[in-house]
Structures are given as C-alpha cells and as structure tokens.
Image: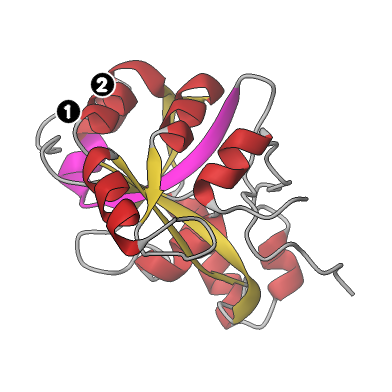
Amino acid sequence: MEPVRPQRQIRTAHDDDTLTVYQAYPPAIADAALDAGTFVAPFKRERMTWIKPSFRWMMYRSGWGTKPDQERVLAVRICRDGFAWALAHACLSHYDRDLHSSADAWKEQLRASPVRIQWDPDRSTNQQELPHRAIQMGLTGEAVHRYVDEWIIGITDVTDLAHETHALVRAGETTKANAPIPAEPPYPLSELLRARIGADKS
C-alpha cells in the first residue's frame, strides 16, 4: 500500500537545476512553442496561463489530451530559480484563515500577486480522486513574461504519451500505464515558501 502523503505537497519530475510542469494547448500554439523553444504567438501573454507539475492531474484536466483546445500536451522544463520566484510571489486563490490574518488581507495579497495557487484533489492513473492535493499555478502579468522569457529551458510534446497511457488505462492495464509516466518525487521547499503557499511539511 502506498504510504499516506501530506495533503498539500508539490510532487514533480525534477533535478538539481530544473523541474517539469505541464500545459495543454491547441495545435497552433503548441507547434509555435515547440519551434521557438518557448511560447510565442498565437500564445497570448495577456491571459492567465496555468502550469501543472502533476502529469496525472494534467491528464484529468485535459481529458488525456482530447478536450477542445487542449489536444496537445506539452512538458515544459523550467529553472528552479524561476519556480522559486513564482512561489515567493504567489497567493492562494481562496481565503484560508490559517494563512491570512483576515479576508481583507488575503484580498490585498491577491491583488498584488502575479501568481495564483490552487490545491486541487490529485488523481490516480485511473483518474480517481485521491485524498491528497496537487498544485496548479496561474501566472499573470510579470510572472508570464518571466516564464516565457527567462524560466523555460525546453519544451517537449508528450501528447503521444498521454494517448498511449490513456489507451492502457481503458484496457485495464494500469500497471503498464504507470511505467512510462515520469516519476514525481516530493519537491523540496524552504520553510518560507512552504508557508507562503500553504504546503504541508514533508
């Protein structure tokens, strides 16, 4: 049996310098990004862009890369320094009395923060809701510009992986579906960043 995880813990494929997040887009945006090595038009910097460290949660959100305008799934490798900046400038998308002194204080932080944090129920490979949470981060304003211009190290199209694992899940071959999915160990956080986003201690 898998050990009980902290309810709010960032888990992602990472090394000493980078980590991987996922996004899903229509072909026009995906192809342009793959050619350029970062996001360019028709990607719109003016819109909030959501990044998701959990592959399985990305599969849930995009319907395994089948939902309209999410047909192409991209693995985006970003620098850890950039991710740390995002967390340090983040605010939860909802008021949490354990983290904020008042609802007004939360609203003020929300207005000033270019990054939104949501902790959503994580998903198993079979897409069943799990008791722990997966993080997704919405980038706006300065955060989007930094993401596109500074943080991205490389972009890989993983749509085929999404479709292959989906086919195995539908065939009842969950163990085989798990094998090619990148391992996502806990991501280390400083105490300051952990408190900022309401993550649990590992």
Name above or below for residue 191 compared with residue 163.
above
Name the residue at 51% across, 28% down. Answer: 84
Percent x, y of residue 82: 45, 24
Please name the residue that numbered disc 2 is placed on. 36
Tell me where residue 19 sits by quadrant. top right
Mark 1–mark 2 CB contact (< 8 Å)? yes
Query: Would you place residue 181 above or below residue 45 in this image?
Result: below
Residue 40 image label = 1
**Distance of label 1 from label 2 (alpha carbons):** 7 Å
Relative placement, left or right, of 88 versus 109 is: right
| Amino acid type, label 2 | Ala
Give x and y (percent) for residue 88. Answer: 46, 32
Compared to residue 41, the image places residue 199 above or below, namely below
Asked whether residue 163 is in view, the answer is no
Q: Secondary structure at mark 1?
A: loop
Q: Magenta segment, which residues? A: 18-31
